[in-house]
Image (cartoon, rainbow, N blue to C red):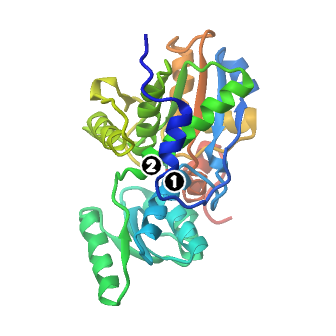
Amino acid sequence: MVEVVVSATELWERLSKLPRVSLGTFPTPLELLPRISELLGVQVFIKRDDLSGLAFGGNKTRHLEFGLGQAIHDGCDVVINGAAVQSNYCRQTAAACAKLGLKCALVLRRLTEVEALKVEPQGNLLLDYLFGADVRFIEPDEDLEAAKEEVANEYRVRGHKPYVIRHPDLSGGFGYLVCLLEIVEQCRQMGIEPTHIIHSSATPTQVGFVLGTKALGLNWQVIGVAPFNRDGVKERIAEVSNLVAEKLGLNLRVTPQEVNFTMEFAGEGYGLPTPDGIEAMKLMAQLEGIVLDPVYTAKAFAAVISMAKDGRLTNKDTVIFIHTGGTPALFAYQTVLAQALGLPTGAT
Ligand SMILES: Cc1ncc(COP(=O)(O)O)c(C=O)c1O
């Protein structure tokens, strides 16, 4: 028996009391992938969070609705975020700030060992500039949080009130509780009973799904697929889930043992595409006309394919694959992808 801690209506109400701004177009579609389902012998639906409506879409639109809601609530006028050079979060932060009339400063980490993560103004980085962000770079070994704080201080000295986005904060957890509630309603309307939710995870998105399924008493397996090899993620997901639960007054606790997070499909690490991921991108593109990204969603969908092939998913299962976005990064990976597609690269 799975215990119900809160009803969907009550959870909506608690979430609606938090500061929030509208940035995206929701609910995003939930659609069957008919040709992929037939090929894999598993019913697979896709939740199109790549169509979330803000600057090429993606999961961070949901995070930012709560994060920037808090920034505006606190009277801040500049938002500081930071991550790798091709960060989807930073691109969406820059776009959201433009839409809300806030200044945006981004601290981007160069990853010199990854061709696509140098400082070519391509993909997400090109868009950061287009949205008018104040872009700074740090080297691989520099402390990102300290660098963000330094930029915030610079703005303070100039009379601004900065809002620093810290990773992970609770906003992604709130955002993905909302996503889960959307899915519950869409499944009711479409008569679907999912057995699995599978998605790319670096913590906050999975927090929403893990906490939400537990709170609503849903017997759905949530599988987070890592884009990197990093220790302690299950612990962090449990910890952030418990902070979100506390903030929403939910009487439950998530333990690391309850978190299904796998690094099996991460390959050599963050930002490095895998052969299985590229095959997954080709399959999704050529059977369904949908674009995945090489860093996150390709690895996550490679997990669905692999689990269908080795019997971890069967024809009794109904999977909802969450498309978390990231597609602008595709263009920073032109060389790798062109090679994988057997195309000539370089000047002609
Ligand atoms: C496209 C994409 N998918 C998934 C993730 C992981 O999301 P989260 O950090 O909310 O777990 C990210 C994070 O940057 C992302 O950009």
Q: Residues within 10 Å of mark 1 (few under 14, many from 20)?
A: many
> In the displayed structure, does residue 193 sit left or right of residue 300?
right
Q: How many marks?
A: 2
Most foreground residue, 137 or 341: 137
Specify whether residue 295 is in view: no
Residue labelled 2 has its Cβ within 8 Å of some atom of ligand 1: yes
At x 54% / y 49%, what residue is drawn? Answer: 59
Is disc 2 in contact with disc 1, using a CB cutoff of under 8 Å?
Answer: yes
- Element on which disc 1 rests: helix
Specify whether residue 308 is in view: yes
- Element on which disc 2 rests: helix
Residue 235: percent from left, percent from top: 26, 35
At x 31% / y 83%, what residue is drawn? Answer: 156
Q: Quadrant of the N terminus?
A: top left
Residue type indicated by callout 2: Gly
Residue 100: percent from left, percent from top: 57, 72
Q: Which residue is tagged 1?
A: 60
Most foreground residue, 76 or 137: 76
Q: In the rendered structure, which disc, 2 or 1, sits on the residue that comes first in sequence?
A: 1
Residue labelled 1 has its Cβ within 8 Å of some atom of ligand 1: yes
Q: Is residue 36 above or below residue 22?
A: above
Q: Which residue is tagged 2?
A: 172
Q: Which mark is residue 245?
A: none
Residue 67: percent from left, percent from top: 45, 59
Question: Which one is closest to the eye, mark 2 or mark 1?
Answer: 2
Residue 76: percent from left, percent from top: 41, 75
Residue type indicated by callout 1: Lys
Most foreground residue, 202 or 307: 202
